[in-house]
Structures are given as structure tokens and as C-alpha cells.
Amino acid sequence: MLSDRDYMRESEGRPPMTMTVRLMIALVAVFAAVQINSVYGRPEWTGYFPLSLGGIQRGFIWQLLTFQFLHGSLLHLAGNLMGLWICGRFIEHVLGRWRFLAFYLGAGVVGGLLHLLLAVGFPTWFGVPVLGASAGVMALVALFCLLQPEAEFLLFFVLRLKAKTLLLLETALALFFTLVPSDPGVAHAAHLGGILAALLFFRARWHDELVSLPWNGMALRLKSIFRRRPTAPVKPAAAPWKKPDRRRDAAIAGE
């Protein structure tokens, strides 16, 4: 909806904080909380939140979301924050706040599901618990490249690449290291899942605000079911101490 766009709302003092910045704050806050808990709290609690096949088999469905807010190191966090800042602001401007959030988290879920699927058949390489926002960030980069193929990126502050070339490069790397896993510490399958989610999102034209998302119809039907139906007004009863005037009622009926 147009009202979901920041530039379509009337400014009332300070502009509202974007969803991109809120996500970045959430990632930093969760990282700090995990570090504090590992020193002063109960470190075993953090084992319930990374994504793992064993956790999903035990019913820890929330791991499909929580793993996207965890990071193993400060460098890991910094890399994802940079990708979120560079591409997230533009994607949020195109999609709107809530569609952007749904795309980002949904792409992360797709990446996590692909990793779990491979963990079933190849537990040696994909059985390691997964954490990090890389799947969603890869999806943001891929969608940016699809929407702005001629834009240029300065990779490592040295190599200048067009967005369409960067998309081919990141897809090729994720696909190669998914088929030829060599480092179980990097979730290449989750990266590939995020990129595939962005390709599906783009092909379905869900980035266009005139095209409704698949779950919008379901949400409207649920809203119509639980919406309170208007009731007919109740005619107030006559006071019990007041006797009816039958002559007056007959005169009114005659008129």
C-alpha cells in the first residue's frame, strides 16, 4: 500500500525509523545479549536458538526465525550489517516496510529449510547448527541486483562489478560450495536458498505493490470471519410502571 511507503506519509517532526535500521539494531542487541549470557548467564540456553535438524525434530520450530538473529563472531555480524545497510534501504523503499520484512525473514526461512533438507541426506557436511543473517542478506543483495542490474558495486573497495555480474558470482559460489562442501562452518546452502527465494519473489512480481502476496487473501478471509457483524438496534421496552394508552395507540394506527 502507498501509505506503507515513508515518502507517502506526511512528515511529523522526526521521520520514522526504517525497518532496515530496526533490524540492524536487533542484530546488534541479540549479539550483545548472547555474549553477556555466555559470561554471566546460562550458556546452555543459547543451544535452543540456532537452526539444527535435531532441534526441528524435537519441535523447536522457532529456530527457523531465531537463527537469523544469531552470529558467531563480531566479523560475521559486521559483514551482515554491511550487506543489510547497503541493499536493505533500497529494497525497503521499493517494497514498503512490512513487505520488506516479510521478504527478508521469508528468504531466511527458505535458506534454512534448504540447509535442513541437505542435512537429512548429508549430515557430515550439513549437520552443523546454522546461525546468522546471511540467507536473508544474500536475498536482499540478489533482489537488488535483479531490480538494478546496471548498478555498480565496489567489491572489497577495489573490484568494481555491475550488479548483474555480482548476482552471477554469488549464485555460482553458493551453488558450487553447496554441491562441493568444503567448509562446514559456512552455510552455503542457506545462502543459495536465500538467493533462490529472491529469484522466485522477482519472477512472481511480488516486488510490485499492485501484485498481492500469496497470504494476503487468507488474511482478508480471516479478517472477514472475525469481523463483528452489525446488529439491528434494539427497541427500548416501555417502562413497567407506565400503563399503555390504548386510545392514543388506536388513534395513531388510524391515522
Image: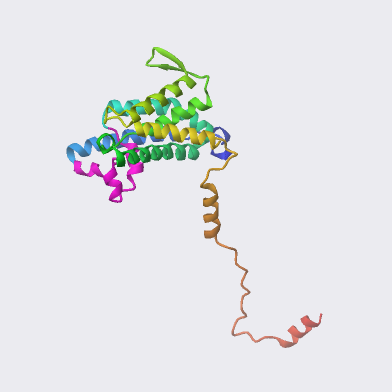
55 part of magenta stretch? yes
Q: Is residue 114 above or below residue 174?
A: below
Q: Is residue 172 above or below residue 47?
A: above
Q: Is residue 204 visible?
A: yes
Query: Where in the figure is residue 94, as x and y percent of width and height?
Result: 53, 32
Image quadrant where one finds the N terminus: top right
Q: Residue at x 46, y 28 (%)?
A: 142
> Number of numbered discs present?
0
Q: Quadrant of residue 39?
A: top left
Q: Relative to the observer, which residue lies in front, 78 or 60? A: 60
Q: Residue at x 61, y 72 (%)?
A: 234
Q: Which residue range is magenta in the image?
A: 42-71
Q: Quadrant of residue 121?
A: top left
Horizontally, is 43 left or right of 192 in the view? left
Horizontally, is 2 left or right of 132 in the view? right
Q: Residue at x 56, y 32 (%)?
A: 7
25 part of magenta stretch? no
